[in-house]
């Protein structure tokens, strides 16, 4: 697979990934992946876990995150770290955008690029 040096947001398709949520896969390599997620107010990122490290940055809006049973409200400018295999999820309190960084890349997301 050839990785792109430049990924233009306007050229990436947003895919529905749940009620009130869309995701765009932006730049990635085998070791890392960046995704942009848009949430409508009230959208729920269900509790889940995965073997990837994940860092999230809140671009806009407000979210109540649950990481390993600890809940906290985060807003624009805040960031979060999720260890591999730790259960986490979120509820969108105010319409918003998250940037998610994964390591290694989420191969399970790649089919979204084929749509």
Image: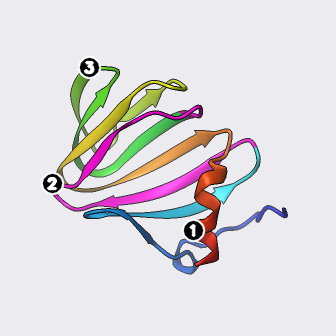
Q: Counting other residues with Cα less than 10 Å from the Cα at mark 1, is it few (<14), some (14-19), or many (20 or more)?
A: some
Query: Which quadrant of the rendered structure holds the N terminus?
Result: bottom right
Residue 62 position in % (x across, y down): 21, 46
Residue 6 position in % (x across, y down): 71, 67
Q: Counting other residues with Cα less than 10 Å from the Cα at mark 3, is it few (<14), some (14-19), or many (20 or more)?
A: few
Disc 1 versus disc 3: nearer the observer:
1
**Name of the residue lying farthest toward the right:** 2
Q: Is residue 68 left or right of residue 72?
A: right
Which badge, 1 or 3, comes first in the chain's sequence?
3
> For numbered disc 1, what is the local secondary structure?
helix
Magenta span = 31-53
> For numbered disc 3, what is the local secondary structure?
strand
For residue 32, above or below residue 67: below
Which badge, 3 or 2, comes first in the chain's sequence?
2
Residue 97 position in % (x across, y down): 34, 56
Q: Which residue occupies 15% across, 54% down? A: 42
In this orientation, which residue lies closer to the viewer: 100 or 60? 100
Q: From the image, tell me which residue sits under label 1.
A: 112
Q: Which residue occupies 36% across, 32% down? A: 88
Which badge, 1 or 2, comes first in the chain's sequence?
2
Residue 13 position in % (x across, y down): 51, 76
Q: Counting other residues with Cα less than 10 Å from the Cα at mark 2, is it few (<14), some (14-19), or many (20 or more)?
A: some
Tell me which corner region of the image, top left, top right, bottom left or bottom right, holds residue 90.
top left
Query: Which quadrant of the rendered structure holds the C terminus?
Result: bottom right
Q: From the image, tell me which residue sits under label 2.
A: 42
In this orientation, which residue lies closer to the viewer: 38 or 85? 85
Q: CA distance from mark 3 to mark 2?
A: 19 Å
- In magenta stretch: residue 48: yes
For residue 105, above or below residue 43: above
Return the mark for residue 70: 3
In this orientation, which residue lies closer to the viewer: 28 or 86? 86
């Amino acid at each position: 697979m050839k990785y792109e040096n430049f990924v233009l947001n306007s050229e990436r398709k947003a895919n529905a990934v749940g009620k009130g949520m869309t995701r765009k896969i932006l730049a990635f390599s085998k070791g890392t992946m960046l995704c942009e997620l848009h949430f409508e107010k009230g959208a729920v990122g269900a509790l889940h876990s995965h073997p990837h490290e994940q860092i999230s940055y809140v671009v806009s809006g407000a979210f109540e995150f649950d990481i390993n049973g600890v809940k906290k409200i985060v807003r624009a400018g805040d960031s979060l770290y999720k260890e591999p295999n730790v259960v986490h999820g979120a509820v969108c309190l105010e319409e918003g955008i998250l940037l998610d960084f994964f390591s290694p890349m989420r191969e399970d997301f790649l089919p979204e690029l084929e749509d």
